[in-house]
Image (cartoon, helix red, strand yellow):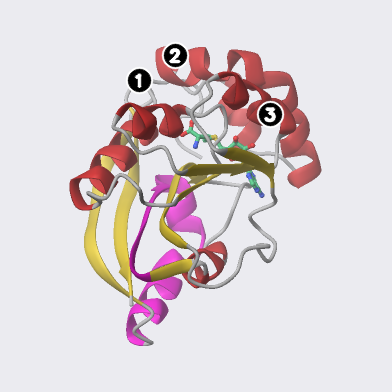
Amino acid sequence: MKNTKRMISTIYDTLHAADLVELEHIYKNWAKKYEDDVINLAGYVGHLITSELLLSYLKDTQAKILDAGCGTGLVGEILNNNEFKNLIGVDFSQEMLNIAMQKNVYQSLELVDLTKKLDYEDNLFDAVICAGTFTCGHVGPEALREMVRIIKQGGYICFTVRKQEWEASPYMQIINDLEDTQAWQKLEHTTKKYNLKEGVSCQLCLYQVN
Ligand SMILES: C[S@@+](CC[C@H](N)C(=O)[O-])C[C@H]1O[C@@H](n2cnc3c(N)ncnc32)[C@H](O)[C@@H]1O
């Protein structure tokens, strides 16, 4: 992987975890320092660009939104500040959720593994937002199908995919398949800066569910 010398060591560790057990252990020990490291050291903007893009389309502040891989709640804070209060945050790290809980911006926070079938009924959410979680060793493109399943017709899914993960996993194949089967349609899909201080980019995607 390129740029690893400049990458802060814990981010490097998360991208190279052997499995989800090791990854969960890394987040457990990182949770309290996570925001300082990703924002101030790496220059992470995933939460900003996803929120900004979703908010440019989603206008109903009553919308029920799932923040998938919510971590410490960076996305929830932004949505809440924009009067979106009907927020559910899910993450597989209890320690990350504990930090998010202190912010009081989610209606509920739940411990969920996004690589598994989600325990939500079909067509439940007006939007799913997923910032920074489609990345190496975290959650792969198959999870997109489950996210689409739980979004209402006309609802939105907004997500980032880190550059290295985009290149390594079949995102394009699954995205095209969802388009070919008319499960969703593309609204926005661009390359954006992601970790400004590491010089890492991402795909920023917004799709509308049919
Ligand atoms: C880079 S952080 C992004 C957190 C937050 N969305 C943000 O923008 O700051 C990735 C998050 O994904 C979570 N995560 C990793 N694998 C997961 C999985 N399989 N299921 C649910 N959450 C997962 C981690 O615990 C972590 O909180």
Q: Which amino acid does the dot numbered 3 rest on?
A: Tyr
Q: Is residue 149 above or below residue 189?
A: below
Residue 70, position in %: x, y? 54, 38
The secondary element bearing badge 2 is classed as helix
Query: Foreground: 52 or 102?
Result: 102
Q: Give yes or no for contact between labels 2 and 3 (Cβ–Cβ under 8 Å).
A: no
Q: Residue 182: which quarter of the image? A: bottom left
Q: Is residue 81 above or below residue 66?
A: above
In magenta segment, residue 167: yes
Query: Foreground: 40 or 53?
Result: 53
User: Nearer the observer, disc 1 or disc 3?
Assistant: 3
The secondary element bearing badge 3 is classed as helix
Q: According to the image, label 2 marks what residue? A: 41
Residue 16, position in %: x, y? 65, 39
Q: Is mark 3 within 8 Å of ligand 1?
A: yes
The secondary element bearing badge 1 is classed as loop
The span picked out in magenta is 153-180
Which residue appears at 70% of the width and 35% of the height?
93
Q: Give yes or no for contact between labels 2 and 1 (Cβ–Cβ under 8 Å).
A: yes
Q: Is residue 114 above or below residue 90?
A: below
Mark before the other along the chain sequence, 2 or 1: 2
Horizontal placement of 111 versus 128: left or right?
A: right
User: Which label number is shown at residue 27?
Assistant: 3
Residue 122, position in %: x, y? 54, 73
Q: Which amino acid does the dot numbered 2 rest on?
A: Leu
Query: Foreground: 106 or 130?
Result: 106
Q: CA distance from mark 2 to mark 1?
A: 7 Å
Q: According to the image, label 1 marks what residue? A: 197
